[in-house]
Amino acid sequence: MGALIISQGRLLDTKAPAIAQGVNLAGSAGQWAGPSLKTHFPKMFEKYRSAAKSGALRGGGVFVWSQSTPMIYNIAVHARPNTPVHLDWFENGLDFTLWDAVKRGHRQVALPMLNQEVVGIPFGDVEPILAGMAAGGACDIILRVRR
């Protein structure tokens, strides 16, 4: 049984073996973790961008980057930057992310929480989903709140 854990600090400073972020289908870095991950993992960003622009990445799908530590799950949550997040896309993508992380032997996945939002969704709306997914699985979900 997993848990929902809230901790302070930058997403990239987590001790979790995997991180997840919301991305768009346009292939551009969003306002959340995107710019930082683009800088730290330029090869991952280019592969994600290619998958998004080619149509290989679809809403609710996940572009997995396992060539880094931590590994990175890019969950397609909205069509373009500054457009509404699809909650069902987030749920589907996070469900796959947690399943895949456990399959790879990971027991924690960290996500960014900025301005009381997780991938652009107000925390109050997404907290029951995150808590339920964590409690029903074998993987902790860690929300990293930037100081």
Image (cartoon, rainbow, N blue to C red):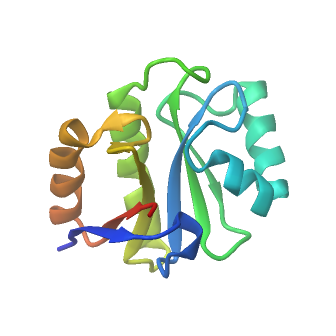
Q: Residue at x 46, y 70 (%)?
A: 9
Q: How many numbered tags mark residues here? A: 0
Q: Residue at x 67, y 67 (%)?
A: 66
Q: Residue at x 60, y 61 (%)?
A: 72
Q: Residue at x 70, y 47 (%)?
A: 35
Q: Position of residue 125 (x, y in %)?
A: 20, 36
Q: Is residue 140 visible?
A: no
Q: Is residue 94 above or below residue 70?
A: above
The image quadrant where one finds the C terminus is bottom left
Q: Is residue 52 above or below residue 44?
A: above
Q: Is residue 38 visible?
A: yes
Q: Is residue 20 left or right of residue 144?
A: right
Q: Position of residue 41 (x, y in %)?
A: 77, 60
| Quarter of the view holding residue 120 | top left
Q: Is residue 132 left or right of residue 113?
A: left
| Quarter of the view holding residue 106 | bottom left
Q: Is residue 66 above or below residue 105?
A: above
| Quarter of the view holding residue 69 | bottom right
Q: Position of residue 83 (x, y in %)?
A: 51, 17
Q: Is residue 12 left or right of residue 143?
A: right
The image quadrant where one finds the N terminus is bottom left
Q: Position of residue 30 (x, y in %)?
A: 63, 36
Between 20 and 116, the one nearer to me in the picture? 116
Between 60 and 15, the one nearer to me in the picture? 15
